[in-house]
Image (cartoon, rainbow, N blue to C red):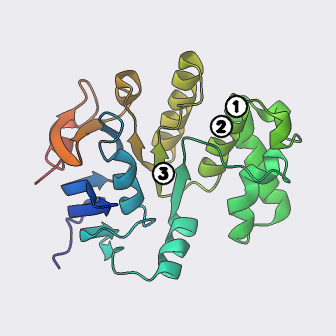
Amino acid sequence: MVAPPDNDVLWARGLHHMHGGTAALAGVSVGVREGEILAVTGPRGSGKTTLLRCLSGQLVPTEGEVWFNSAPVHTLSSPSRERLRLDRFGWIDTEPHLVPELTAWENAALPLLLRGVGHRSAKHTAIEWLDRLDVGMCARRRPARLDQSQRQRTAIARALATTPQVLFADEPTAPLHRADGTQVLRTLTTAARSHQITVVLATHDPDIAALADRTIELLDGRPSDATPVSGAPDTESRAACSLSV
């Protein structure tokens, strides 16, 4: 194994992964710098979700390497990868997956409580993020009393509440109306930049991808291009950290 570049917080090389005999990833390599917002684009079924799941340690690639802060993720045991996801990573899914018995603020505070943060501090942080995402008035409601948009915003607050080092977002605005989705993504990207959170965002929406610093495109599990977003900061140096196949 060859260690990744020091300036990449997240780095993967030669990722292959099979789903039921079909190649979901076929030789994807990517590096992401600290504080960078990277959009992974492509049509449905192109391998975006599989790539995010391999990078976050949810899946072990069939072939290839994944490194986080110059430490290998692909060789970790399942409990160690789970601990890494709890301590360093955040995840926003297409569906919110809230705990139905908990209120909105309890759902948003749950990762903090699992880390051992005190109840009062966790509640304060959770409500703060719910407020930033315009669902503070729903803090005491359980998921059954929330509409789809409110549930998704609560899930996003849950992911941001821990201030993760890397946040993975898999089509996070899919359940939202277009205007709501753009507003929520702007809140997310603004928060990420202010807290130096690295974001890997999967989307098939070019307007959402335009909020990122850089985009990479997948097609049939393979990288098809690496295009810096026009006007994004430091695009020339970020482009050097793009795909290598």
Q: Quadrant of residue 128?
A: top right
Q: Secondary structure at mark 1?
A: helix
- Residue in the image at 48% along x and 45% along y: 169
Q: Tell me whether circle 2 and circle 1 mark residues in contact (CB < 8 Å).
A: yes
Pick the front one: 64 or 106: 64
- Look at mark 2 in the image and give the residue it sits on: 152
Pick the front one: 84 or 149: 149
Residue 92 in percent (x, y) is at 55, 47
- Look at mark 3 in the image and give the residue it sits on: 167
- Quarter of the image with the C terminus is bottom left
- Please indicate whether residue 24 sits to the left or right of residue 134 in the image: left
Any mark on residue 148, and which? 1
Question: What amino acid is found at the position of numbered circle 3 in the picture?
Answer: Leu
Question: What amino acid is found at the position of numbered circle 1 in the picture?
Answer: Gln
Residue 1 in percent (x, y) is at 17, 79
Residue 16 in percent (x, y) is at 23, 62
- Residue in the image at 57% along x and 54% along y: 163
At label 1, counting other C-alpha atoms closer than 10 Å, the crowd grade (few under 14, some 14-19, many 20 or more) is: some
Earlier residue among tags 3 and 2? 2
- Please indicate whether residue 171 sits to the left or right of residue 44 in the image: right
- List the single residue furthest toward the top: 179
Q: Secondary structure at mark 3?
A: strand
- Please indicate whether residue 101 sits to the left or right of residue 74 in the image: right
Q: Quadrant of residue 183?
A: top right
Q: Tell me whether circle 3 and circle 1 mark residues in contact (CB < 8 Å).
A: no
- Gap between marks 3 and 1, in whole Å? 21 Å
Residue 170 in percent (x, y) is at 47, 44
Q: Is residue 179 visible?
A: yes
